[in-house]
Image (cartoon, helix red, strand yellow):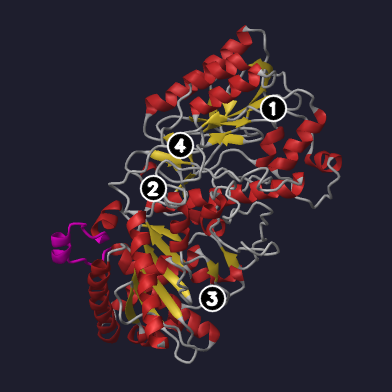
Amino acid sequence: MSNPKAAYIAYTATPFANLLIDPRVEQDLYPRDFIVDLPRPAGYFGAERIFGQMNNVDIDNVVDDGLDVVRMMDEDEVDSVRPPRNKSLLEEWTPDIPQAMDSAIRWFLLATTARRLRAGNVAHSSMLIHTSMLAAAHEKTAEAVVDFLDTVRSELANEASAEEVFRRLWEEETDRVMAESFGNRRISFDEMLPHLIATARETKVIVDNYQSTDRLKYDKKHPQTAIVIGGNTLSRGLTLEGLVSSYFVRASSAYDTLLQMGRWFGYRAGYEDLIRIWMSAELKNWFLMLSIVEAEIREEIAVYEVEGKTPAELPVKIRTHPQMSVTSAAKMRSAAKAQVSYSGRRVQTIMFKEDDSRWLQNNIDATRRLFERLITEGHAESELPGIRRGFADVSAADVLSYLDSYKIHEASKSIDKDAIRRYIQQEHAAGDLVRWNVVIMEPLTGEGELDLGLGGKVRLLRRKKMYIPTSDGTANLKAIASTSDRIADLEVGLDLVRQSLGLKASDQLSDRRLLQYRQLRETNRIGVLCVYPIAKESGLGRKGDSLQRIENGRAPLFAADHVIGLCFMFPESRNPKSAVDYVAAPVDAEYLESLEDELRLADELDEAKAVEDEKVKG
């Protein structure tokens, strides 16, 4: 810039591209001076609020699963609504309205009617259908939706049996997410029914893409009730007013684009209980991953405030995903090859092969061998202070040997066995992580027991799995460790921890604060390995009921054998070279739609609009 006094401040909800600008280029817009994490307003619905946080259990052992508003569709349905990429096949393609899309459209009519009754007036209400970036596919999908709406209108007007489909959907959904939990009035179906057909008749289907002539417009004097089908324009900042229902199967390979596509993020005052999202299990996992990324970026930014550093001194690290890029290839050019340090981190196993008895038995046997070896070496299971069983002052060699024999699910994104091994070895060479405390995280009471080679059998924990239907028998527990487990090997109460840190009794104890407490009382950097024995049948019901819908998207665990979960609690490193290389797997270009094509088409749209605006001005 020619003016030395110029300043630039940017506000963004997707900072990934900004954080990967090369800070060495002074003329570029890398935020070298400061980054501020703005607090989230109480009424804002973001990724963490909707999808929860993986690997996160609070101090009261409550898992953050997010709101119970996401509904998953079968993979067969995902395939059926995605158009063929071959142009000639696309011309012949005739989409239908499969089960999940049927429910999503009906829910839109129900939720819109409920909003009208609560508010006493008609306001903008929208539904999003986002299946592809192809404009031709949008038109064909719109034709199918229009035909479906015509059928629904006819049924509501002429067939009493049509009411039962809506009644069942309304009562099931409103039981899962209670209006009262947000301070909203609960609307009965009988109150809603007389008004439902009016909503259906007023609903329009709008295609909004770079080829559209009839674009989506919101006018305060003429409230829209619209089902919007689109592609690029819906992922480029267009706000959908009153969005209550989303049907979303579109895949993008970049964090920022995926978040921008999530038009359900925002404020939903007065209808918080009515938002619903239908998507694939894979996309739900991706958005859950993004909620972790966002939380980690906030933690990274908090370091600037605590340590008084600037982004120029300490760049923000962004976790990578094997099937996703952080942002577009053009913006990734300045990104350095990632390194990961486990300094101060908790790393836990959360994914298990529920149906593979040999895989599960391997981890049981590996754990039993570890305990028997420690006892043979002269350790006793009562070496830890307090009531928990466990072993103190265990060698790093024993921990690494156990890690080698323990099986980690290959789909686990947050725990890399080889990287952990190399990190421990590097810390060991620098004189840290030489000794470990091993804690057996059994409950105080419990019916199930497991022989792990100790003086008495180990009592078993009960954990439910995420309700994410898969064909490979994977159970995702989302989290097994609670925040307070950071000090599970110490005989100390949480009130004493707060007192030692100068905190009030009402102050929340985060993992960072517990880590700070450990460092105040320990001169050596000791690792903590927590072992979680989990009952193979954890939750009410029978084997055949294992995938039934339960509260907050959790289902009972019915594993072929008992599950052994692990959590490595690493202290802060004193070794400046503690980081180890981390290499992400390449993106599957054949599976994902091309981000570069999407950006090119969107840019063409922007250019065409600019030309049109210039003609109007002329």
Left or right side of 526 for 339? left
Could you classify mark 2 by the number of other residues whose Cα lies within 10 Å: few (under 14), some (14-19), or many (20 or more)? few
Magenta stretch holds residue 558: no
Q: Earlier in the sequence, mark 2 or mark 1?
A: 1
- Alpha-carbon distance for marks 2 and 3? 30 Å
Q: Are marks 2 and 3 in contact (CB under 8 Å)?
A: no
Q: Would residue 572 appear left or right of 537 to someone viewing this image?
A: right
Seen in the picture, residue 484 relative to 579 is either above or below; the reply is: below
The amino acid sitting under disc 1 is Arg
Q: Earlier in the sequence, mark 3 or mark 4?
A: 3
Instruction: Give the number of the disc on residue 208.
Output: none
Q: Identify the residue shown where x is 46% and y is 47%.
A: 332
Q: Are marks 1 and 4 in contact (CB under 8 Å)?
A: no
What amino acid is labelled 3 in the image?
Answer: Arg
Which of the numbered marks, if any, corresponds to residue 545? 2
Q: Give the mark toward the camera: 2 or 3.
A: 3
Q: Position of residue 162 (x, y in %)?
A: 29, 77
Determine the CA span between mark 3 and mark 1.
46 Å
Which marked residue is nearer to the observer: mark 2 or mark 4?
4
Q: Give me the disc on residue 388.
A: 1
* Disc 3 target residue: 186
Query: For the residues marked 1 and 4, what is the alpha-carbon distance in whole angstroms?
Result: 28 Å
- Tags 2 and 4 touching, CB below 8 Å: no
For label 3, the SS is loop
For the residue carrying disc 4, how many other residues have a C-alpha within 10 Å: few (<14), some (14-19), or many (20+)? some
| Amino acid at the residue labelled 2 | Asp
